[in-house]
Amino acid sequence: MFLLTTRPIDDALSDCKLLNRKNINAVASPSMKIFQNSIKLNSIYDGIFLTSRHAAHVIKFIEDKKTPVFCVGSSTAKLARMYGAENLIVGKSDALFLANKVKCYLPKNSKILWPSNNTLKDSIYIDLENNVYNVDKKQTYSALPLKELDINSTNLILNKQVLIVLFFSFKSTEMWIELINKANLFKFLNNINFIGINEKIVNYLCDLSLNKVLLSRRKRRASVLSLGMKVFNNMEKSL
């Protein structure tokens, strides 16, 4: 039996490598592909707000590598360090927790670069701006949906060999379900366990009438993987 991880292919393969070392039959089942956009920075920033590892490449274009870089998690921090960042503050949770870190470290009227896959003025953006921070949110990468589900995932689902599917972002969850519907595989999902990194994902899956949905204890990749391993091993023993 198998576990599917739905992050973009390079990230999913990293998950599989870790899970396979723990004797979990893990397979990459991506729903999107990441494209890095060209970047031109004309300003000097007091801090960099990294909510995704896919945005870490922006550090290459920051002249002062001692600029504080706020990272949503350890994997993002690892990449930022690889690109030359010398002053890392790691949130180890979600974007809201990271925004609170900014308030602790930077004085008001600071200018913050937020490299992202969109320029939406969401609740995190508004929270930072309301605390008198000048937030420059730039689209530095794009997450585009794949045209179809990979053949390996398709065959495993058709043959009822999937025990668990892991979801790490709401957008990739939506895209994965769209690929499932496109392949007419939704009816095969009823006996699969789904694990989401946050409540939004869990609520979305429950609204689709999928009844085996679990929420990870913390909003971190490691927490999702840990719960996935625990559930997988328990289910394997019961087969």
Image (cartoon, grey):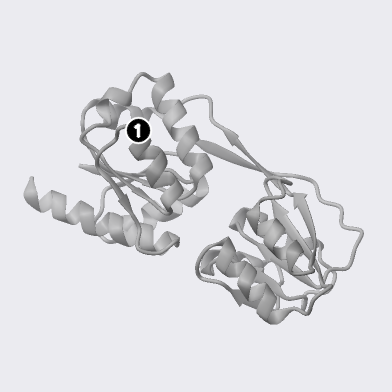
Q: How many marks?
A: 1
**What residue is shown at x 70% (from left), y 57% (from top)?**
125
User: Viewer-proximal residue, 163 or 94?
Assistant: 94
Residue name at image x 38 percent, y 27 percent: 151
Which picture quadrant has residue 233?
Answer: bottom left
Vertical position of residue 47 compared to residue 227: above or below: below
* Closer-to-camera residue (42/111): 111
Residue 181: x %, y % from top left: 40, 22
Q: Quadrant of the C terminus?
A: top left
Residue 205, above or below 150: below
Residue 229 in which image quadrant: bottom left
| Residue, disc 1 | 153
The image shows residue 129, relative to residue 177, as above or below, that is: below
Which type of secondary structure does the marked residue at label 1 adopt? helix
Query: Is disc 1 surrounded by few (<14), some (14 to 19) or many (20+) residues within 10 Å?
Result: many
Give me the residue at 21% from left, 52% from top. Answer: 232
Left or right of 235 in this view: 157 = right
x then y, percent, for residue 126: 71, 57
Residue 13 lies left or right of residue 43; in this view the side is: left
Image quadrant occupied by the N terminus: top left
Amino acid type, mark 1: Ser
Q: In this orientation, which residue lies closer to the viewer: 43 or 26?
A: 43
Q: Position of residue 141 (x, y in %)?
A: 69, 46
Residue at the limit of the structure toward the right, as seen here: 42
